[in-house]
Image (spheres, helix red, strand yellow):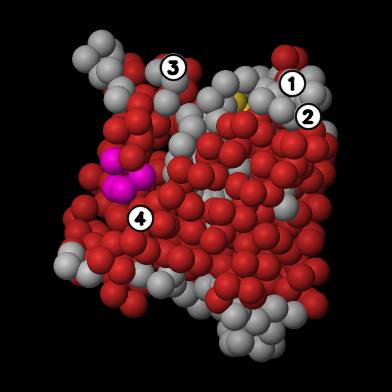
Amino acid sequence: MTTTATAGTSPVPLSAPAAAGGGGAGGAGTGRRPAAAMLLVLGSCTSLQAGAALAMRLFPVTGAPGATLLRLGLAAAVLLGVVRPRVRGWDTAQWRAVLLYGISLAGTNGFFYAALARLPLGTAVTIQFLGPLTLAAVLSRRGRDVGWVLLAVTGVLTLGVAASRGGAGGQLNDAGVACALISAAFWALYIVAGARASAAVPGRGGLAVAMTVGAVALIPFGARGAWQVAGRPHLLLIALGTALLASVVPYTLELAAMRRAPRRVFGILLSLEPAVATLAGWLLLGQRITLVMVAAVAVVICASTGSAVGVSDPAAEPRPYAGQRARQDAAGPPG
């Protein structure tokens, strides 16, 4: 909802769930303007969730696969037009990295939108956060990161209990939860693949081609639904707005934020995304929230923040993965 997912910049290697958000090309921030970085990240999260809410208006006509194809396809078209990647000089290793990156984008976004069709926005994003948090624990040498993952799982289970008692308007849809968990797994893959692709292909060319690969991979599943917008200008505008709000705008803002804040601060700010998604679901979609649900989201945010706070000097850490926005999208996540 990490997005999502999610794409205007190529991912930058981050640590812990600083991967909870998207990527920007370039290195860690300078830390000279943290206040500006905070506004940029909040703007990115808001744009991403607004895009997800907008995409849900397409679901009755296109279905989740069709909406995902439109989002990735239109975002890829924008990026290809702006970046114009020079692919003729790419070797086999570069193509392999970009192709895997594109598949991870398709899986992250496709299953996330499938989850959105069945779950509240905040719930889907919160469950999806398990992907980067688990990856952080697996790749980390710190035992306490396992504790943060267990804390996050506690928060997600609390969401399920709240829903089973009517807190979310009924019991959580099993298929929706499964889709969110699969999206979380693809989000973790996206983080690893994004880091490799960004290292193999400098600039945003790899991202533009990867998004194109992701869109092509979704054609067998979403072409029929996406075709339903043909001849309907208002739906095409919604699809274009989704691509811009959920991909191009958030990743552009995150890139700017990465240049203004240290990686640790960036990760902490992105940990607020489940809260932003829950608020967006309430304000934009009229989805019900309860105090128990708010508490559960807060637990996940605490787990993500705790893991990000533990990040030390970026120069002294391994660089195993990148910004995660792909969860919801892919360019980022997003997610």
| Image disc number at residue 202 | 3
Give the quadrant of residue 7. Answer: top left
Q: Counting other residues with Cα less than 10 Å from the Cα at mark 1, is it few (<14), some (14-19), or many (20 or more)?
A: some
The image shows residue 24, relative to residue 227, as above or below, that is: above
Q: Are marks 2 and 1 in contact (CB under 8 Å)?
A: yes
Report x, y in % for residue 186: 46, 46
Q: Are marks 2 and 4 in contact (CB under 8 Å)?
A: no
Give the quadrant of residue 145. Answer: top right
Please report whichever mark, 4 or 1, sits nearer to the chain's N-terminal start.
Answer: 1
Q: Which amino acid type corresponds to the residue marked 4 in the rendered image?
A: Leu
Report x, y in % for residue 57: 41, 72
Q: Which amino acid type corresponds to the residue marked 1 in the rendered image?
A: Thr
Label 2: state its secondary structure. loop
Query: Which residue carries the number 4 mark?
Result: 240
Label 1: state its secondary structure. loop
Q: Marks 2 and 1, how far apart in space?
A: 8 Å
Q: Which amino acid type corresponds to the residue marked 2 in the rendered image?
A: Arg
Q: Marks 3 and 4, how far apart in space?
A: 27 Å
Which quarter shows the N terminus?
Answer: bottom right
Q: Marks 4 and 1, how far apart in space?
A: 33 Å
What is the span of residues highlighted in magenta in the rendered image?
73-77
Query: Which residue carries the number 2 mark?
Result: 33
Q: Are marks 1 and 3 in contact (CB under 8 Å)?
A: no
Say if the magenta span includes residue 66: no
Report x, y in % for residue 201: 40, 18
Label 3: state its secondary structure. loop
